[in-house]
Image (tube, rainbow, N blue to C red):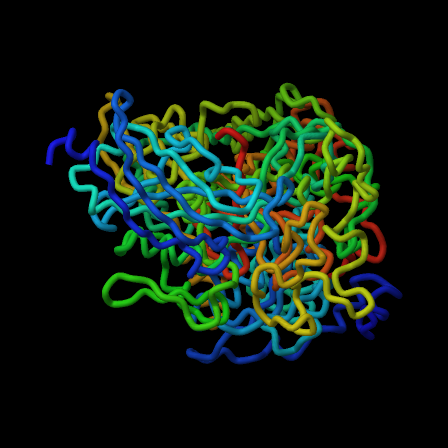
Amino acid sequence: MKSLNRREFMKSTVGAAAGLTVLSQHRAHAAGEKIIMGVMGLGGRGTYLAEKFAQRPDVEIAYLSDPNTRRFARAREVVEEAQDKRPKMVQDFRKILDDGSVDVLINATPDHWHGLGTIMACQAGKDVFVEKPLAHNIWEGRKMVEAARKYKRVVQVGMQSRTSPYTWKAKEYIQSGKMGDIYLVRVFNMMRHSKQKETPNQPIPEGFDYDMWCGPAPKLPYNPSRRWLNQWEYSCGPIAGDAVHQLDLARYLMDDIPYPETVAHAGGVNALRDGRETPDTQLATFEYGRLTLLMEAALWTPYIKKIPGNIRDSDRFPNWPFCSTRVEILGTEGFMYYGRHGGGWQAYDAKGELVRSEYGRQADKEHQDNFIDCIRTRKKPNADVEIGHQTVLLCHIANISYRVGNLKLKFDPQTETFTNCEKANQYLKREYRKPWVVPDNV
Amino acid sequence: MTLRKLLLSFVFVVLCSRSSYSQWLEISNVKLRREPTELAGPKIMIEYDINDPNISPESPAYVFVRYSRDSGKNWQLIPMDSLRGNGFDIVEKPGHKEIVWWGTSQTSFADANQVEVHVRGIAMARIPAGKFVMKSLPGAGRDESKEISPDPDLPLFYMAKNETTISMYTDYLNEFGGEVAGWNPRMAREKRCGIVRNDDGTYSIKPGRENYPVTYVSWYDATNFLQWCGLRLQTEAEWEKALRGGLYLDGDALKKKPNPMPERRYPWGNESPGTDGVFRCNFDTEDDGFPYSSPVGSFEKFGSPYGVSDLAGNVAEWTIDWYSTSYHAGLDGFRMVRGGSWMAVPAACDAITGATQLPLKESSIMGFRAVKEPGK
């Protein structure tokens, strides 16, 4: 923690980090040359991504990073098993950015670190694979797009379902007009979460850089019972964190519709009244001219399940009414069930007859392949940062509608602001804790 | 041979103990004898000697018997409720033991000459009933759906003093045999495990690896092994109590030995594992003498208040507990793993460290140990 870069950084803000723009930015990546990666965030998803990328012959995981050293062993073990080479273990992800030999940062942190971690990586000349939801707030998402474009970085978002061939076929089917005009798309995201407990604050455990973990967010007293996912300071909410996949699929199936004109939210913290801030029940209506997108989500419906493991990647379909991650497309001439997680899709005609079925396969590997390809070709990836921004924006505006009292809000796509509620605009951007500040000019 | 003739015959079979496999307790002079009874059906007497002087009520042996009725081709565990005598289940004194195996369905052998038994013993620690301090962090992976009492209490249980060894597991593999046993090719890696599958379907141990903890075992592998022994995995609460000790080390029934450090961070106290150049467990340093795992019990003198070794480091250990905080990931089958490992930083060898793993995970830093509930 004594590196020159850190001291320089602490003096100012992340804006200074633009000076880190480096050497790897223009590195050629010839076919066969290994791409060197560092991983930021060693929870379940970060460890999974570290393992999967390490298993590739064209990738080396050089760094694993997490403020909590208790997470080191599990991630290091899977990487060593995969690539037979020990990665460097660091608590401070800036050591990854400082290393000019590193090409890529994998950002699998909690939501509040997605934006700044990605922007700093772009400034340091790294390509980025960032987990969904792309950004903690709308303003930050736009800054991520700006950083990616300014530094000519490939930024792929972990919304892998749009890389599945069965998804492409579904879009093709819908866009062919066989379902008539589409006026309604319904997105579901039903889960079961348990209540969080209320326990006293605790001392910060040894080996955990809690200040680093909080980063741009307030440094609240340490309380492991308070789940970050349920707090606005760290999260977009557990529903947003998962529904963003189906919302992205809905947008993709509808040819990447950009911005809704209005949003109206209903719901709140109804079932899990345990001190959480983020809602457990969310019904959001997004109006795109004559197309309406509905999101129906809750955290207290155990009977509606995600697609079971024995159906994912199989020649079977889920039990649609009880499939928690489905998208329904309603046209004037037909109807479609679409299932995330390789659940496939089935289309019905105006008489309600089944007319087309496609089994599904998940596409995590294909999504990673696409990222690697784009690193070499410098093309935009399937889930480019702009796509990630426009998708998570739906979660944000639904949340903001809730936070201002479930008001119907009008949204201006040019300025990415609300036009009928000044209070709502207060939630477009967070207050950043110094020195972890996203600058206006990235 | 008719059943009556069988009942009247005396059969002596000298059977091997399993002491050739490290970490089974040494059991010798195993004999099996059929005794006739006039009215109660066939009765088998199993005799053996267990002479480990460390066996005591606080450090008993868990003894179980497996038998084959076809000259060692197929084996079964003798249910504890079919046994009587002083030498099975929890055995609290060393010496000569006699077990009565009583059950017509099991002991009516067509050919008694083909009957074999294997008697095996595991060193256990007695964890008396009583309250303890549970401090594991929800953020570190505790199953938050459980009702963790603010004043937790556990009944009496017994925990294996050591992690399950490569030799114990290989013994199990060889009794099972074939390709379906819980072996995978990574187990052959000498530095991280060291069990080789031979062309004839048997399993052998890389020289010198007998006493190291078995690794690359899935949760299912661990569970199957323990069921084979008549045991089960530990719960998180049991692991944590075994590490810190209860509020009273002799249990709440006696309350004569207050635990001087009921909130200790490590089994030995609060010093970090490598403080002052003294290495108290196997963590991520080669200075402790072990670049990978270490033979079980290598840090015995830094064991828990009950004499349980390697809870802090060496290999992390599967527990029976689910992790079900959320279905967020769509995968509701995670199991909890507790404790540090040879790859862990010192802080991760403490009493609150845990991780979630899918039960099929096979890792070089994960093993398991056994727990026995009395009467089950």
Instruction: Answer with left or right where residue A291 lies relative to residue A430.
Output: left
Residue B134: image quadrant is: top right
Asked if B4 appears above or below A206 in the picture, the reply is above
User: Split into 4 quadrants, where in the image is the C terminus of chain A?
Assistant: bottom right
Q: Residue B152 or A344: which is nearer the viewer? A: B152
Position of residue A46 measured from the top left corner of the image (x, y, whole percent): 57, 55
Position of residue A166 measured from the top left corner of the image (x, y, whole percent): 33, 46
Whether residue A423 is visible here, answered yes or no, is yes
Q: Residue at x 53, y 55 (%)?
A: B366
Whether residue A138 is visible here, answered yes or no, is no
Give the residue at the far right of this rendering. Answer: A11
Residue B257: image quadrant is: top right
Instruction: Answer with left or right where residue A374 lies relative to residue B53.
Output: left
Q: Residue at x 76, y 57 (%)?
A: A207
Asked if A369 appears above or below B218 in the picture, the reply is below
Q: Residue at x 80, y 33 (%)?
A: B256
Q: Residue B153 or B111: which is nearer the viewer? A: B111
Instruction: Answer with left or right where residue A441 lies relative to residue B328.
Output: right
Position of residue A163 measured from the top left corner of the image (x, y, whole percent): 41, 52
Asked if A70 appears above or below A391 in the picture, the reply is below
User: Split into 4 quadrants, where in the image is the N terminus of chain A?
Assistant: bottom right
Position of residue B302 measured from the top left corner of the image (x, y, whole percent): 72, 57
Give the residue at the far left of this rendering. Answer: B1
